[in-house]
Image (tube, coloured by chain):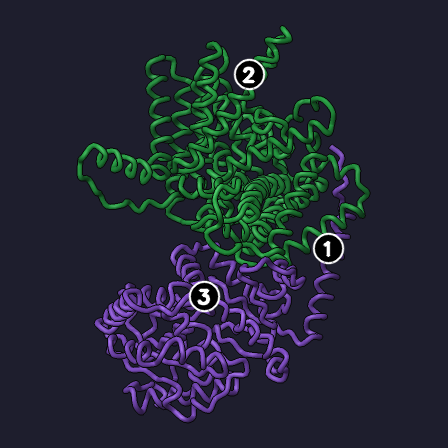
Chain colours: A green, B purple
Amino acid sequence: MVFNSYTFVVFFVIMLALHNLPISWKAKKVNLLLASYIFYAAWNPPFILLLWLSTVVDYFVGRALYTQPNKHKRHLLLVISLIGNLGMLCFFKYGGFILENFVHLTNLLGVDFHPAKPNIILPAGISFYTFTTLCYTIDMYKKKSEPVKSLLDFSLFVTFFPHLVAGPIVRPPQLVPQFETPRKATKQQLFDGLFLLSLGLFMKVVCADTLLSGASDTVFGSGGLMGPLDAWTGVLAFSGQIFFDFAGYSTSAIGVAMCLGFILPQNFLYPYAAIGFSDFWRRWHITLSAWLRDYLYIPLGGNRSGKFRTYINIMITMLIGGLWHGANWTFVAWGGLHGVYLWVEKAIRDSRSKASNAPADGTPAPVIATASFGPPLVGKQSASFIYALLTFLLICITWVFFRSPTFTGAWRLLHSMFGQAPPSGPPLLETIVIIKVMVVIGLMLIFHWVMRNTTVLKRTAKMPWWQVGIVWSVMLILIILSQGTSKAFIYFQF
Amino acid sequence: MHTQVSSKAAILAVIIVLTFFVSWELYLRHNGIAADYDDGPELWAHNRAMVYEPANKATVFIGSSRIKYDLDIPTWESLTGTHAIQLAMVGSTPRPVLSNLANDTSFKGKLICDVVEVLFFSRRGTERPSAGLNYYAKQTPAQKVSFILDKPLESSLAFLNDDHFALNSLLEEFHVQNRRGVYPFLDFPPGFTPNMFNRQNKMSADFIADTNQHNQVKAVWGLLKGDPTPPMSGKPLDSVMQSVKNDVAKIRARGGDVIFVRPPSSGFFLMAEHHLYPRKAYWDRLLAETGCKGIYYEDYPEQAKLDCPEFSHLTPTGAIAYTNSIVSILEKEKGWSFSAH
């Protein structure tokens, strides 16, 4: 089920009604859990079993990890949990990719091996709920928090439908305590939640699907070289589309949860206003970058094992972060390119701090766990805006690898972007499409810059109610006018 | 945290939205626009699921847009007593759908395939069939429910029309000049494209009466004249013929049957089709290689005299006459029998 569908509208109205009935808190939690399973089953019913299995196994393994005094047995339990969760992820998500690369390798070595291609369906949200349950078991191993008291609360933590299939990736302390006490939305939370849900749908349906996806699909789907205008329009369109699609989902999820009285963490903080790549990773998919920092980068040693090792740890984290997104080397290349950007940024920062004899400004840690404001603006506003624009353009280059299904396609598009070869056919995009993309991306960059140190709800607090009402109505009108086939969220495939 | 997303803002938003859409709906209806159904993958998949009805209770139609206009489904159903399952797609080649039905061992029914040469014998026109087939294969329970919920809304609201009144379509109305060589947006007037729930297209009375609108559609066909792609021939054509032959053989081996129909066209469209796709090299060869029977409109006076106002599709009145003729020919000459008789 997707948020932008009639089915979800009916589902959500029923959920709101049931959640506000005068019944016991336990009954409401059971209701939420059943609704979450229905939400997931509405995509593909049999895969509920996988979700349920992952939940039950990790609940009992987590509890055992926390209470087991024997160090070796605790290690064993952790290994079981890691193998279970990552094994499931590897099979469903990377099974075909692993086999394909194994076949390439064996053929390179002269062995004639051509197995049948497996037809493995990727369960929706597996990357997200697997990371959520891994959070829990690793935290139990480290005794970072108390075990969840009941299977019901743990199941809700994993399966809570707003965040189930595409995040935000929540940590147990962020969500479990909210299930322990009865709660429903206050009148203010309900209206805030509905506003955020509308904003999220506006971002997804209007900006991503209606105004940007056409140009992106046309350019990335073209098999030939094209002129720079078409190439850049397509790449800019995708840069906007991926943001609006994913941030739209996260905003909708936060809004839906808020309508039920729950608070989910922020996942995006105007990333295209980032000045530099460390700043970008503090603002883009915040919960994933926090997860990678806490469960990969820091265990690898972080910045505690010397400069060379820090660079290696940054690159490993970014490469694995890239691979998490999909079973294709282009995603790894995307992560690797971000790693290179972070390296260059760190090297510049380190050399500046050396030259000024001032302490280094910490490693360019790619994440911040909480949704904090970005660092203070460095230098003049206009210079900072130029740096932010440069950061954005370099990020756009990385999106070419993220979106292209092959390296050939990616290189072809990069060549086209920089006018390296004449177009192989007529121009691709209609003028109105180019105008749409440029207007939307321009407004997006301005909006990000203006909003980089605040949030939507804080901003609306400063606006008169009638202005909020007008903005809200414009979003709703454009959502309804957009119509069209509801496209799946891009991050559902991850 | 204090915010201003208050009940007053929400109420104002609802009032503005309702006012806008009531006004917009009244405006469209005042201009002769009626509610119809978006002809997207959802509706196509709904029809695709019906092909398993027994051969004596249903006939499946595939093809391009001509059969969507030229087959009058109520006439067909009253004359034959069988359900007409319309799977044709505008601007598309029917070959992917033919292959899909051929490879579906549960399909054993009767199939009528419309041949519009420029699309049938083409490597292009596969986007909509791919989208429809993919949607059908992967449709989720949630999507099925959304389809059911959507039906009463689409049947009641004229503004729910993706082709003409969605945001992107409204922006196309600015008619911003394109660079030379860019494939243009095909701007069909709303009265040309109304689509029923059974997937029959019917020109509106307003469209039929207005020659300016006919000329607007003819101008769209004129844009397509500029396509430099030559007609398919040689090995690619041989390959297409072989592929269609194989698909037909699979369906017939299971007890099904396939008949090809060539609906009317006129004006410069017909001249271009005769010139680029001579009957002997394409239509006659198709029937000979597949062993199928066919109904070519020019062979039947009652069909040959039918006129297409924009050179390519029949009016609703013409569709009734064409459907009457097709049913009669199928029964008298092609050996098909229907339960109504």
Q: Earlier in the sequence, mark 3 or mark 1?
A: 1
- Asked if A396 appears above or below B187 in the picture, the reply is above
Report, in whole angstroms, how far the alpha carbon at label 3 lies from the one at label 1. 51 Å
The reply to the same-chain question for discs 3 and 2 is no
Circle 3 or circle 2, nearest the eye: 3
* Residue at 55 percent of width and 45 percent of height: A228
Instruction: Please give the label number shown on residue B228.
Output: 3
Q: Position of residue A231 (x, y in %)?
A: 53, 46
Q: Position of residue A108 (x, y in %)?
A: 23, 34
Report whether residue A468 is seen. yes
Circle 2 or circle 1, nearest the eye: 2
> Would you say A145 lies left or right of A109 here?
right
Which residue in the structure is indicated by mark 1? B14
In which image quadrant can residue B56 be found? Answer: bottom left
Q: Chain of mark 3?
A: B
In which image quadrant can residue A345 be found? Answer: top right
Instruction: Please give the label number shown on residue A363.
Output: 2
- Asked if A265 appears above or below A305 in the picture, the reply is below
Q: Amino acid at mark 1?
A: Val
Q: Position of residue A414 (x, y in %)?
A: 49, 40
Circle 3 or circle 1, nearest the eye: 3
Q: Nearer the viewer, residue A95 or B294?
A: B294
Report, in whole angstroms, how far the alpha carbon at label 2 lies from the one at label 1. 49 Å
